[in-house]
Amino acid sequence: MRGARLSRIAGGVRGLLPRTVRARRRAVRAVMVLCVLALLPSAWTHAVAADRLGSTARAPAAPVAVVFGAGLLGSRPTPYLADRLDAAAELYRAGKVKVVLVTGDNSRTGYSEPDVMRAYLTRHGVPDDRIVSDFAGFDTWDSCVRARRIFGVDRAVLISQGFHIRRAVALCQAAGVDSYGVGVADVHDVTWYYGGAREVFAAGKAALDAVFKPRPTFLGPKEDGVSRALAL
């Protein structure tokens, strides 16, 4: 009975396949075209960021460093977010940036990435008056648009993990922020592999954001936090 069942399943699968050589060739070409289209957004992010990436040591001087949120563990940053904040503190101590803009999620009570990021940076030598918080950085596009339109940032060093930094640079460029990306070192754990796989799909949304430039989830009035911090 098992053999008969397997035979029926195999027959059903064969029935789904194109029956002629020409049809099979068309199916193969269609799959190849779909694969190329799926990878085009990733190719775009790589092309835009190609000469705009490096380490903290190679990063050019800029008025502002932008650190993107990456989740919390209670009242602490995740290891990935801590690595980003360490890089921002290093840039500040080296005199390469004057202000750090922390952008992240504060969409629910008791959860504030910017507050935790600020506290971490102050513990690592960045003065509180040199840190500006964006509480509505719900995704990368929102953070980039708000950095430009709300906080008036037109040039910045962006800090994230390697799997995300190209997309961040491409989106901030599209939002009008002249950007250089620092991809911090990261452990190739489950989160890293998930992040890398997710980027293939996220790049598609990024390309649409860059073309259609949607309004962020929350825009709000302009804020002078960055300009005031730069004037100190």
Image (cartoon, grey):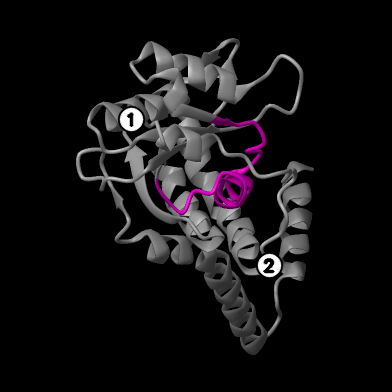
Residue at left 46%, top 54%?
Answer: 154
Total labels: the figure holds: 2
Q: Nearer the viewer, residue 89 or 44?
A: 89
Residue 87 is labelled as: 1
Residue 187 seen in this snapshot: no
Query: Does the magenta-highlighted stretch encompass residue 140?
Result: yes
Question: Based on the displayed image, in which of its 4 quarters is residue 26 positioned?
Answer: bottom right
Q: Residue at x 76, y 54 (%)?
A: 9
211 vs 176, nearest the viewer: 176
Left/right of residue 191 with respect to residue 84 in the rendered view: right
Image x and y of residue 35, in percent: 55, 68
Q: Quadrant of the N terminus?
A: top right
C-beta proximity under 8 Å, tags 1 and 2: no
Q: Amino acid at mark 2?
A: Phe
Whole-angstrom CA distance, mark 1 to mark 2, is 32 Å
Neighbourhood count class around disc 1 (C-alpha, 10 Å): few under 14, some 14–19, many 20 upward: many
